Amino acid sequence: MRSTATRLKIGFLLAIAIMVMNILVPVFSGRWIDQLRLERQAQEQLRQEVQLMLLALKDSQSSQRGFILTGREDYLSPLYQGFAEIDRLMPILAVKAGSDADLGATLKNIRPLLIELREFYNETIEVRRQQGLLVAADRVAKGKGKQIKDSIRNALNEFQILLNQRIVLLEREIHWREDMGTIGLSLTALLDLMVLGMLFFFTFRVLRESRESAQNLHSLSEQLSSGVQKLELRNREISLLSNMAGALHSTSLFDECFGIISRFAQQLFPQNAGCLALYHPSRDVLEETGRWGDWEPGNELFEPQQCWAIRRGQSHRVRDVSQDLICPHLDGHPGLGHGYLCVPLMAHGEPLGVVTLLGQGVDIELAEAFAEQVSLGVANLSLRDSLRQQSVIDALTGLHNRRFLDETLRRELLRASRKQTPIAVVLLDVDHFKRFNDTFGHEAGDLVLRHLAQEMRRHVRASDLACRYGGEEFALIMPEITLEDAISRCEALRLAVTRLQVRYGGQPLGPISISLGLALFPQDGQQAEILLHAADSALYEAKRGGRNRLCLYHPPRASDLPVLE
């Protein structure tokens, strides 16, 4: 009898231990996997920076060629900007690859090549200035610059290949760890069944051994039933948390993310109304982004100091609203009669927001596990969105950048080719832009570019694409438009710019005008590079014709082509 009772006690202790394992296994496995995901994101960011360096090299080469062909000094702006971008990226790559022997060695080989390439470009530019086009073209034709650039590109490609291999290995390791986590959960469930079977066995053995223990056995059965219910409930909660984490990792939209959180919160806390409040991008207030249950909207915007959980950096529970500290953002809320729980959202040591649950029966451990998964999901989504925005948006004007233009133009050309519809490609820049920088400073020049970007947004259709092409040069892509409509829109934009009254430091900057060059698909070219070159030639013709005008691209006549001796 005593032996059986002892075994029952041991069985209950094992059940409690397994319940603890049910909580710890998914938490630690999630952290184990998230560590590798962060490392993979770091490698991915490093690869994007290498791609930016390759784009900078490409821009600098195009700029040098443009200067050699035209002799115009403003064609050198992308060259200087490209090497400035390289100078910015090299220390970043050096820091990130400093502790890695393979990446550090590859990066060390690239530095002297970059110095040699810059010296070659400077010498070639000086030769063009002093001795003219033919001598400079002959120097370029010898291929030394191409040889240096190819060496740099090969080294960067090796750098990228090594990063790609590491990313693939990290992804395999992530999948392996996810499989191991699933196996761990399965083993835990198997242990649950084994312990339950053992407990049932000894319970019925006690019933057979003595009628006198019937009352105690009944009590033990009730305890067992309660334990099974709690175990099933815990397993369901763990499954819901795991499904929510997977859904949050798969989404790329914030609205969808908030909807996922609200739906799973309704299932995890069916008896508790609640809401999710996140920091506004301004970081000075929090706003409600999701709610569930019978939550009645109150203060949809409130300051961080109005929540005790955020101020203390830990969960804040209120059981008695007449004695405990009430968060000011919930003061007067109609659902506070039975208390509430506020759990702060933290990721990478930074506060993200707070989860609030109404009622007394809130499982604080479940609420904190829920808040942890929500924090990781929101933080990862914010990081992915930030990286995507940085890669395709120009920081100064808010327009899309050259990289986005190259990707989008090729896609639009394929679509237009299938539909047999035209596309207008326009390049434009600010006339005498250097005057603004020299007279009023570079901040005034930046202000002019921002006003021009605003006018471009006002004069383009929803289907059009406005981009900053580089420096003071911009690009417009207008699909499915006739030549007459394209000319009309360009002229409307040009006239709108001439009416701009921009002031900097209380002082007017003077008249602003733009020159535009227009090329049309398919008659002026059927490839992105050819169309952009045609639009650039038309822009150059507008500059030569007196500026503040629109010029259409006209193919060069045989008499206009230079004769090579």
Image (cartoon, grey):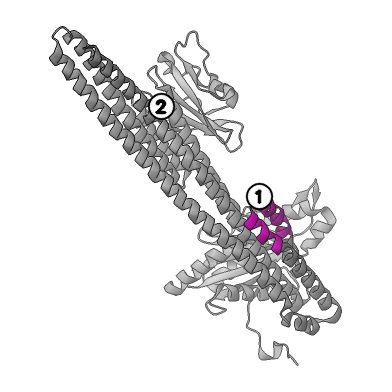
Quarter of the image for residue 442 reads bottom right
Q: Within 10 angstroms of label 1, few (less than 14), some, or many (20 or more) residues?
A: few
- Where's the N terminus, which quadrant? top left
- How far separated are the C-alphas under marks 2 and 1? 40 Å
Compare residues 468 and 540 and report the one nearer the observer: 468
Which range is magenta? 84-109
Q: Secondary structure at mark 1?
A: loop
**Residue plotted at (59% across, 68% down):** 488
Q: Secondary structure at mark 2?
A: helix
Residue kind at label 2, given as amino acid type: Leu
**Residue plotted at (53% across, 43% down):** 382
Q: Which mark is residue 284?
A: none
157 vs 362: above or below: below
Residue kind at label 1, given as amino acid type: Ser
Residue 484, image x, y percentages: 55, 72
**Residue 501 visible within the image:** no
Q: Which mark is residue 366?
A: 2
| Secondary structure that dominates the magenta span | helix
Q: Which residue is mark 1?
A: 99
**Residue plotted at (25% across, 19% down):** 224
